[in-house]
Amino acid sequence: MEDALKTGKTFDIIAGHFDKTRRRPWKEVVDFLRTGHGKLLDMGCGNGRHLVPALGMGYKIIGLDASVELLLISKRNIFGRVELIRGDVNELPFSKGSFDTVIYIATIHHLRKGRIESLKEARRVMKDGGRILVSAWAREQDRWELEEDERDVIVPWHHENGRVLERYYHLYTLGELEEDMLKAGFRVMRAFNSNGNNYVEGKR
């Protein structure tokens, strides 16, 4: 929980600026949502940018995030019945088999430890046959000037008020993300790279 709280506090500070610059839902996520149904969990829902189109598709939605401020922004951004919960992606407050569909977008890379455990938690709360889409910043991006085996970086957020905040990222290769999904017990249906992110679609 300590890891999530620390990340949540950082995003509490940058929440307003984040919302101004991160409004558009990602096509890859919207395309995935179009093929799903039922009860949806967004692990690390942020400002709710992916919950807005999901609501229009008829999902019953729960959004979870460690940042209180981002959850408040989500509540303002979403017009419809969506349950928003402050929580830890390593300790999901839901019963086994609660969800048909899960999206875990641009969040797992902020975990310093427990990444596989968080994927196991996602699998635990999914129904048999349920589907999940996980994304993380790609190690393969040209922007990184790192040693061959280096994966962990600190990326600054330059706030509009001039403050600079440090954010931890674990940069996943596509193969590593796919391997972690398999270790968590998922069947990997598809793995791909798009717009600087690695994605793995899995099935319980």
Image: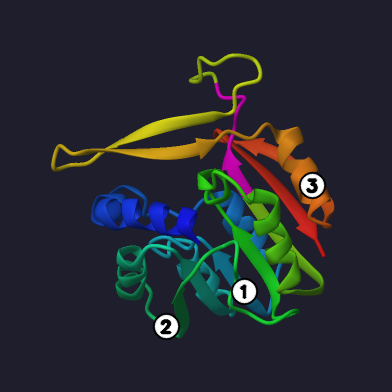
Q: In this figure, what is the number of numbered marks?
A: 3
Residue topped by disc 1? 40
Question: What residue is disc 2 on?
Answer: 80
Q: Amino acid at mark 1?
A: Leu
* Up-down relation of residue 42 to residue 39 (above or below): above
Q: Quick check: is 140 in the magenta stretch?
A: yes
Looking at the rendered structure, the kind of residue marked 2 is Gly
Instruction: Judge from the rendering whether residue 97 lies leftward or rightward of residue 57; answer left or right.
Output: right
In this rendered view, identify the residue nearer to me: 191 or 118: 118
Residue located 25% across and 50% down the image? 17
Label 3 SS: strand
Query: Circle 1 — which element?
Result: strand
Residue beneath disc 3: 190
Asked if the residues shown at circle 2 and circle 3 are in contact, with their CB atoms under 8 angstroms apart, the answer is no
Q: Residue at x 74, y 52 (%)?
A: 201
Label 2 vs 1, first from the N-terminus: 1
Q: Earlier in the sequence, mark 3 or mark 1?
A: 1
Q: Is residue 157 above or below residue 95?
A: above
Which residue does the image show at 60% across and 57% down from the upper left?
Answer: 104
